[in-house]
Every structure is written in structure tokens, then in C-alpha cells.
Image (cartoon, coloured by chain):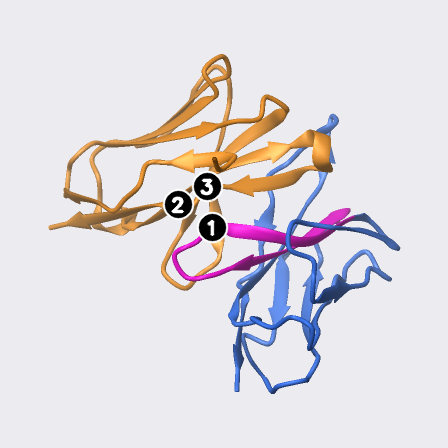
Chain colours: A orange, B blue
Amino acid sequence: RKEVEQDPGPFNVPEGATVAFNCTYSNSASQSFFWYRQDCRKEPKLLMSVYSSGNEDGRFTAQLNRASQYISLLIRDSKLSDSATYLCVVNRADQGGKLIFGQGTELSVKP
Amino acid sequence: DGGITQSPKYLFRKEGQNVTLSCEQNLNHDAMYWYRQDPGQGLRLIYYSQIVNDFQKGDIAEGYSVSREKKESFPLTVTSAQKNPTAFYLCASNTRTNNINQPQHFGDGTRLSIL
């Protein structure tokens, strides 16, 4: 079983749709959590950190449930420019801050 | 502008050849990392360094070597022992604030192929 698992994609949604991505992690030593966005053939870019209380940045909302070891990302009012692969990432403080990446969920927003 | 610079953007390796990928950062970050990404897969950690003159193996270190002689620089050498080097290589860096690891920021990567 992979340490970080994401919803298999791809997700194909129309513009304006709301889409949710789920992610689970298996190691309770995971300290901090992030969502990254990766465009085709580009480097990953930080989308947002994920806090226990939940956090929102415009159309994006991230949630963390430590008890269930579950992370989510909600995108409201999808735009064409949201099309990308979304990576769930956990930080293993017990391993020198090593990042563990999920395999990514591809999102395609259609007109 | 602060950031992470990787070079070259594209690199070709011949059989039996060692090649070195450059990574430089001017963010004053202590920690630097090298990842490999294969098509359709997540990133895998090759090596990381939390301080100058010190580095640790990641999950797939075999066939690779690194050095950290300066804070700003963390070059990766892909040796001839790495039999399947074709991949997208990403360098990242971060720092720690209040004993919490901050997000890692990435360079724009080097694509390595075998000739």
C-alpha cells in the first residue's frame, strides 16, 4: 500500500463545476500537509498548505482530518485554467522533512 | 528575484557516461532535495541535504551521487550505474520555521534522456 494515496483520475468536469479530490496517508508521523499543482511537463507549484482547522484561498478549500488521516481539496466554480494534475503531499518530520507525494489526480475542465 | 535555478533544461547521456545536473538557490534555504519523476508517476526522493557538507540518501539513491559544498548549490551526478536514467529531475529547497518544515519550492526541472 502506498504511503499517500489519491483518487485515481482523470476528472473531466464542465466549467463552473465544483470538484473534490481526496487523499489518505498511512503514517501518523506525518507532520504537515500540502496540495501542489503540476501543469504538463512543468515543475510542481505549491497551491496551498493544509491546516487542521481547514483553510480557504479563494475558490479552493482544503481540509485535514488527522484522526482519519484524510486530506481533501475542493475547487468551486472551476475554470479552464484549473486543468492540471493535483498532488497531495505529506511531510515526514521524523525523516528530515522528507516529502511523500501522492501519484496525482488529473483534472480537465472543459468549456 | 529569489528562486531555484536548474540547468540544463534538457540533457542527453551516452552509454557509460556520467552527467551532472546543476541546482542553485538564492533563497538562503538550508535544505535541498533531488527528486525524480517518471511519466504518470509521483515524485521519488533521490537525495537530500539539510546542511552544508551533509546529505542523506532518499528512496532511490542507487546510481546517483551528490555534494553540498556550498549552501546555495546541490549538484546531482547521474552515474553510469543508473541503468534507467531517463526521467524528469526536480530540485527543491525549503527552510524550517518554529521547528516546522515549510513547503518545498521547486526549480523548473531537467529532462534527461539516453542517446
Residue type, mark 1 in image: Gly
A3 left or right, relative to B3: left
Within 10 Å of the Cα at label 3, are there few (<14), some (14-19), or many (20+) other Cα atoms?
many
What residue is pinned by disc 1?
Answer: B42
Where disc 3 sits, the SS reads loop
The residue segment tinted magenta is: B28-49
Residue type, mark 3 in image: Gly
How far apart are the two marked residues, 1 and 2, measured between alpha carbons?
A: 7 Å
Where disc 1 sits, the SS reads loop
Q: Residue at x 41, y 61 (%)?
A: B39
**Vertical position of residue B90 compared to residue B17: above or below:** above
| Image position, residue B71 (x, y; %) | 81, 56
Of the pair B83 and A101, the residue shown nearer to us: B83
A62 left or right, relative to B113: left
Identify the chain of the residue marked 3, using the numbered disc in the image.
A
| Image position, residue B94 (x, y; %) | 67, 44
Does the magenta segment cover residue B47? yes
Cβ atoms under marks 1 and 2 closer than 8 Å: yes
Cβ atoms under marks 2 and 3 closer than 8 Å: yes
Cβ atoms under marks 3 and 1 closer than 8 Å: yes
Labels 3 and 1 share a subunit: no
